Amino acid sequence: MTDNPYQDGRGNKDRSLGRESTSTADPVRESGPTRAAEDAPFLIGDAMTGGYGKGPDILHDCTIAVNPGEIAVIVGPNGAGKSTAMKAVFGMLNIHTGRVVLDGEDITALSPQDRVVKGMGFVPQTSNIFTSMTVEENLEMGAFIRRDDFADTMAQIYDLFPILKEKRNQAAGELSGGQRQQVAVGRALMTKPKVLMLDEPTAGVSPIVMDELFDRIIEVARTGIPILMVEQNARQALEIADKGYVLVQGRNAHTGTGKELLADDDVRRSFLGG
């Protein structure tokens, strides 16, 4: 997608925001996470079928994956299972068949908490900040699994989101919607994740704020951290995507690069308004 200005220079510029891979395989790139096998995605929810509790299956043989430095987006109509697929990868619902593999390790049986320890950073769509705490306290909460000095990571997040540094002593609940999302993403990054998962990060924000958030998401991807994102603003999301998944009724309907999906007549007609 070299004709997309968002994509120019995409690559692993500074891996220090993310956690190093534990794989002993050769790096996929000069820096950044590694994959256990040359042809295996760094993170994959593979052929997932399942749903919530004892209810009916929502996902049907659904597969989503992302590699280091990539932005992969999941789009589709309302009720297509987009957020459900994300939650399945994060371990928030049972999958009856299929598996989830991170950095060569099968983590299908792990709880969400254990997946965070393994390197998953997850930002839910709602209730994703502590409103009564200050911005800085929210970020400190993100470092709960760390035992090292996280001051450098905090400084990096303030560089990435300058408004958060300016408002670091302000209650997070007093921020705008876009600023709250920056706090939520920043808190996830404080864990030094191997992969960052975002569930509709631009929901309810203005187009200007959406563009700003997408810019910051691109900056995170440039550090080498894989980003898996569910997004309701499908056209805009596919414009920045290295990989896109269109889901319909919990199944993969279309898969390709963002550019390929934007150019697909069926995708444009059915999901992008022509």
Image (cartoon, rainbow, N blue to C red):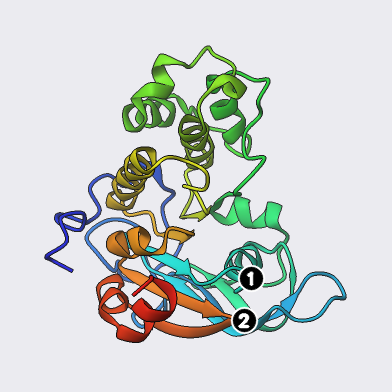
Query: What SS does tag 2 mark?
Result: loop
Q: Badge 1, how many Cα within 10 Å: few under 14, some, many 20+?
A: few
Image coordinates of residue 183 in percent, x first then y, are 51, 32
Task: State how far apart marks 2 and 1 are (Cα).
Answer: 7 Å
Q: Is residue 262 above or below residue 34?
A: below
Looking at the image, is mark 2 or mark 1 earlier in the sequence?
Answer: 1
Q: Are marks 2 and 1 in contact (CB under 8 Å)?
A: yes
Residue 166, image x, y percentages = 40, 15
Q: Relative to 119, say whether 60 is above or below.
A: below
Q: Is residue 26 left or right of residue 192?
A: left
Percent x, y for residue 228? 46, 61
Q: Which mark identifies residue 172?
A: none
Number of marks in the image? 2
Give percent across and percent down for residue 265.
Answer: 30, 84
Q: Amino acid at mark 2?
A: Gln
At horizontal 38% and vertical 70% (from top left) the residue drawn is: 272
The residue furthest right is: 54
Give residue 161's quadrant in the image.
top left
Q: Amino acid at mark 1?
A: Gly
Residue occupied by mark 1: 79
Residue holding disc 2: 249
- Residue at left offset 24%, top offset 64%: 29
> Which residue is depicted at the point 63% across and 70% down?
79
Nearest the eye: 248 or 30? 248
The furthest residue to the front: 274
58 relative position to 86: left or right: right
Q: Which image quarter holds the C terminus?
A: bottom left
Q: Nearer the viewer, residue 227 or 265?
A: 265
Residue furthest left as drawn = 3
Whether residue 126 is situated above or below residue 60 in the rendered picture: above
Q: Is residue 43 above or below residue 128?
A: below
Q: Quadrant of the N terminus?
A: bottom left
